[in-house]
Every structure is written in structure tokens, then in C-alpha cells.
Image (cartoon, rainbow, N blue to C red):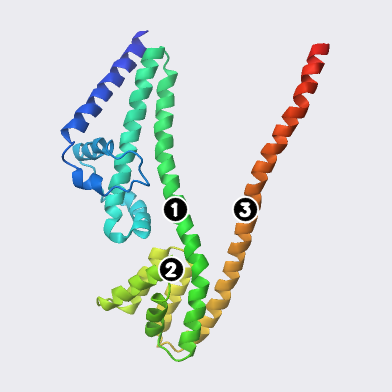
Amino acid sequence: MDIMTKVMFIAGIVMAVAWVILYVVNMSRYDRELSAVPREDYMMVSPLIFGFGFMRLIRFDIKKLKYRGTIEKLANLKGKTYAEYYFYVMKASEMNWVWLSVTAGLMMAGLANTGELIVLGVMIGALGVLYRRVSLNDQMAERETQLLAEFPAVVSKMTLLVGAGLTMRDAWRQIASSGQGLIYQEMRLVVADKDNGRTDEEAYGDFGKRCGQKDIRKFAISTIQNIQKGNAQQIEFLKDMSDEMWEVKKKLVKKKVEDTKSLLLIPTFMVFIGILIMVMGPMLASMSAGF
């Protein structure tokens, strides 16, 4: 073991001891935070104690501008009330994972007498952080797809109700209580906002922001504009929007079918490769024996 790898090993030991100390010191401090951590998202909850303690030690500032985008995504997924908590848990998990990965990399580099393993530790830490970010983006994309799939039916119902003489407010309230899908949950939040004294413009504006999907944002903005104009062109707008949204849904279904076909090609290709190996293996073996 040369001097450099000895230094790496000692650094790994120091980091491991620091992890244990910070964990033990904070064991009883974060019981409430740990009790609310979703087990389906985090397989091991107790190591988060280190992450919470480390964030407290470095005085991690959750209010920084660079974190706002991630917090807004979590607000859409988990609700505005708990967005900062879920962000706090996510950062604790990332810090814990990176610390342990680098620690393991340093110790293995020292034991194996090669500095390359520390690079591996850093890469594993970075991949863990990347996985969490990609997973969040995938959840957002899945949410937007679900909203978009449910939205055409909502616009069609609204077109019929407004055309039958109901006001936009009454039609919205009636539709919001008629289903259990994600879009209906978001619509019920609009009803709750109005009941709590917010204006229609504010409630519909937040609805568009929460949903995130561009077509739903367009609907929310156009609805606000029609309210400001006195609802004179409301029914024409809804008819046009209904036709447009059904076309969008057709494209969405077509894309899902194409994606499914692409996924089905993977096992077919693997079977083909397996058969090719089975056929070519004996042939290559006999050829090599002949030479």
C-alpha cells in the first residue's frame, strides 16, 4: 500500500467514523420526520438520520432559488403543503448516498491499493443522485400523461353543461364531483380555493400551473380571458377546445401503441440472439477444432 492509497484508506475511515457519530448524535432528533417518509420511495429510512443531521450541520438553505423548480414539481406530485418536506427528505437521501459511496470508494481504494476505486465510488454516488432526479421527472411525465388522457372527457362534459345553460362555476363544480381521476382531484382543489375566497382568475391560474401540461395551461388561460370578457364567447371556446383535446388524445393513444410495439421488440430480439448463439456456437466450435 503506497502513501496515496494509505491516505485514501485513512480518509475513508475518517468519513465512516464521522457518519457513525453524526448518526448516533441525531438518532432521537428526527423521529417525526422519519415517521412520515414514504416507504415505497425509500427502502431504508433510518440512514436518512445522517442526511438530516448533515443538512443541519451545514445549515442547508431550502429557500435558495436553484431549488425552486424541484420543489414546484414535488408540490404538483405530493401537494403544496408537503412539498418542502419531501424535498428535504430527497436531499437527505442524496447526501447520505453520496457520503457512503465516496466512503466505500476510499476504503476499497486503500485496501486494493488502487486509486481507480475512488472514481468508482464517486460515480456510484453521482448515479444515485441522477436516479432520484430522473425518477422525479418520470413521475411528472406520467402525471401529465394521465391528466391529458382524462382532460378531453372533462372539456366535453363542460361544453354540454355550459351549452345547457349552466354557468362555468356551476359546471366546474358539478364535473369536479363526478369522478375520482387525477384531473377531478385538481378540479376539486379549484372549487376549494373559490370556497376559501380566492377569485376565479387565481383559482384557474393555479390549476393550470399545478397541471403543468401545456394544453391544460392553455385552457386555464383562455378560461380566465373569457371570464374577464364576460363569458361572451365561452361556449364557442369550449367547443373548439373539446375538438382540439380529442385530437390530442388520439395522438396520445397512437404514441402509447407505438411505444408498446417497441417494447415488445425487445424480448423478440433477445430470443433471436439466443437462437443465433445456439446455432452458431456449435458451428464455430467445429470450425475451430478443424483448424
- Alpha carbon distance from label 1 to label 3: 19 Å
- CA distance for labels 1 and 2: 16 Å
Three-letter residue code for mark 3 = Thr
Residue 174 x, y percent position in the rendering: 39, 81
Q: For the residue carrying disc 2, how many other residues have a C-alpha within 10 Å: few (<14), some (14-19), or many (20+)?
A: many
150 horizontally vs 205: left or right: right
Location of the C terminus (image quadrant): top right
Q: Which residue is mark 3?
A: 260
Q: Is residue 221 visible?
A: yes
| Residue 157 drawn at (x, y percent) | 49, 80
Relative image position of residue 215 (x, y in whole percent): 50, 68
- Circle 1 sits on which residue? 139
Residue ID for mark 2: 183
Instruction: Name which of mark 1 and mark 2 comes first in the sequence.
Output: 1
Which badge, 1 or 3, is on the more N-terminal residue?
A: 1
Quadrant of the rendered structure where residue 165 is? bottom left
User: Quarter holding the N terminus?
Assistant: top left
Type of amino acid at the residue the image marks with label 2:
Ile
**Please, what is the three-letter code of the amino acid marked with disc 1?**
Gln
- Apparent side of residue 3 relative to residue 54 in the rendered image (left or right): right
- SS category of the residue bearing label 2: helix
Contact, mark 2 vs mark 3 (Cβ under 8 Å): no
Q: Residue at x 30, y 60 (%)?
A: 80
Which residue is pictured at 67% across the width and 46% down the height?
A: 265
| Front of the two marks 1 and 3 | 3
> Quarter-wise, where is residue 257 in the image?
bottom right
Q: From what the image shows, is residue 128 above or below residue 75?
A: above
Q: Secondary structure at mark 1?
A: helix
- Given residues 157 and 103, the one toward you in this image is 157
Residue count near mark 1 (Cα–Cα under 10 Å), binned few <14, some 14–19, many ≥20 = some
Q: Horizontal and vertical percent for residue 289?
A: 80, 12
Nearer to us in this view, 97 or 182? 182
